Amino acid sequence: LSSGINAEYGDSSHILCQSANLTDTTPHIVDMPRFQSAPKCFACEKSVYAAEELHAVGKLYHKTCFKCTNCGKKLTPGQETVHDDAPYCKNCYGKKFGPKGVGGGATAGCLQTE
């Protein structure tokens, strides 16, 4: 009987129940509340549940998805550098976006100017 209800309504958001009044045997259809789906990971766009969530750079990630965009190294919140909403490890950020010169940006803090 419930499969007919589901076929008629096209989903499982309805439940078939009978009245508490024992003389009334007419089935009644009751709307079931919809649960909100879990929020999505910024990196993989899959559902993130409380036990696996990590908040960093203003976004929500799985703990395992919070990685450097360039090299894939796992990042620790607060130790990352961000460019265009993408997290980078400090080494990759320096190489990609730091000053060019000796070491390709990796030694940006060590350059001397005279």
Image: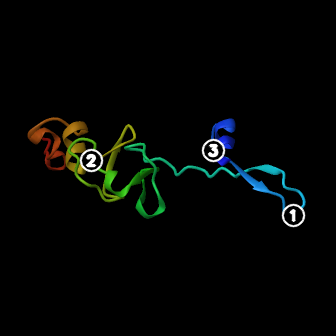
Give the residue at x 51% y 50%. 39
Distance from label 3 to label 1 (Cα)? 24 Å
Q: Residues within 10 Å of mark 2 (few under 14, many from 20)?
A: many
Q: Residues within 10 Å of mark 1 (few under 14, many from 20)?
A: few
For numbered disc 2, what is the local secondary structure? Answer: loop
Q: Which residue is mark 3?
A: 3
For numbered disc 3, what is the local secondary structure? Answer: helix
x and y, in percent, of residue 88 in the image: 28, 46
Front residue of 38/111: it is 38
Distance from label 2 to label 3 (Cα)? 48 Å
In the displayed structure image, the side of residue 64 where residue 20 appears, left or right: right
Look at label 3 and name its amino acid: Ser
Look at label 1 and name its amino acid: Leu
Q: Marks 2 and 3: which is nearer the front?
A: 3
In the displayed structure image, the side of residue 112 where residue 49 appears, left or right: right
In the displayed structure image, the side of residue 40 where residue 76 appears, left or right: left
Residue 22, numbered label:
1
Look at label 2 and name its amino acid: Cys
Give the residue at x 63% y 41%. 11
Do the CB atoms of the residues marked 3 and 1 lie less than 8 Å apart? no
x and y, in percent, of residue 108 in the image: 18, 45
Quarter containing the C terminus: top left
Front residue of 69/79: it is 69
